[in-house]
Each structure stands twice: as C-alpha cells, then as structure tokens.
Image (tube, grey):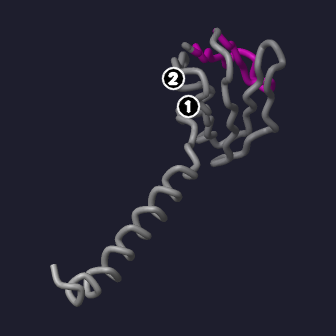
Amino acid sequence: MQPSILRGLWPSAAAAALAGLLTGAVASHAVTEAPEASATIDNFTFAPAQLTVKTGTTVIWRNEDDIPHTVSSSTRLFKSKALDTDDSFSFTFTAPGTYEYFCSLHPRMTGTVVVEP
C-alpha cells in the first residue's frame, strides 16, 4: 500500500482499536446483579408457599393484601417491618438450606425458602 493510503486508514484503525479497548474496559467492570425471585402476600397467604432458589438469590416479598403483614424468619435471620399494601421486603440468601418464615402479625401465615447450592 502507498503511504498516503495508510495515512488515511490510521485514524479509522486507531478509533476502532480505542473503541474496542474502551468497550472491553467497560464490560470487565460491569456490575453483575444477583438473581432475584419474588413472592406475594395476599389474602393471608404467602405465594408460593415454598420457593426454591439458588445460593445468592435475593427474594422479594410484596404485600398485595389490604392489611399489614411481616416476613419473619423462624430463626430470626431476617425480619421485615410491618408492610403496608404495595410495600416490599427483600433478603439475599447466601447459604444453602431450608428457611422457614411467618407473619409475626398473623403467625398462621407461613412459608419456606429452599436454597440450593
């Protein structure tokens, strides 16, 4: 190739290389979000009653009932405040196991989260 042709390609090649480097830098520093799962609270019931997730999953409970409820671990690992209609509570499960929970305002309301490795 003639030098004049190479000079014409240089800015485009440099721009492409720089764009590739910047894209790679951004991708390598991207934040990875933890997986999420959800459960609803409605009609004095947690749904689903048993939720199975992988370790590292954040479970989000949303109160769709017209009265307050809580989400309280049977082992005191987590406990929400009283959740009004449309309020939510979340907890990230970092270890495998079976986690039973209930509504401290209505103790007959129960649920279970099974966390798999």
Say which quadrant the N terminus sits in. Answer: bottom left
Measure the alpha-carbon separation of dots 1 and 2. Answer: 6 Å
Q: Does residue 33 belong to the magenta stretch?
A: no
- In front: 30, or 110? 30
User: Quick check: 31 left or right of 68?
Assistant: left
**Which residue is denoted by mark 1 in the rendering?**
39
Q: Is residue 62 above or below residue 71?
A: below
Circles 1 and 2: CB atoms closer than 8 Å: yes
Residue shown at 75%/23% (left/top)?
106
Residue tagged by mark 2?
A: 48
Q: Residue at x 38, y 67 (%)?
A: 17
Q: Which residue is depicted at the point 51% across and 23% down? A: 48
The amino acid marked with disc number 2 is Pro
Residue 50: % across, % down:
54, 16
Q: Residues within 10 Å of mark 1 (few under 14, many from 20)?
A: some
Q: Per the image, is 104 magenta?
A: yes
> Magenta part of the protein: which range?
98-115
x 78%, y 13%: residue? 74
- Name the mark on residue 17: none
Q: Where is 37 relative to 26, above or below? A: above
Query: For the stretch drawn in magenta, what is the main secondary structure?
Result: strand
Q: Earlier in the sequence, mark 1 or mark 2?
A: 1
Q: Residues within 10 Å of mark 2 (few under 14, many from 20)?
A: some
Q: Label 1 is placed on what type of residue?
A: Ala
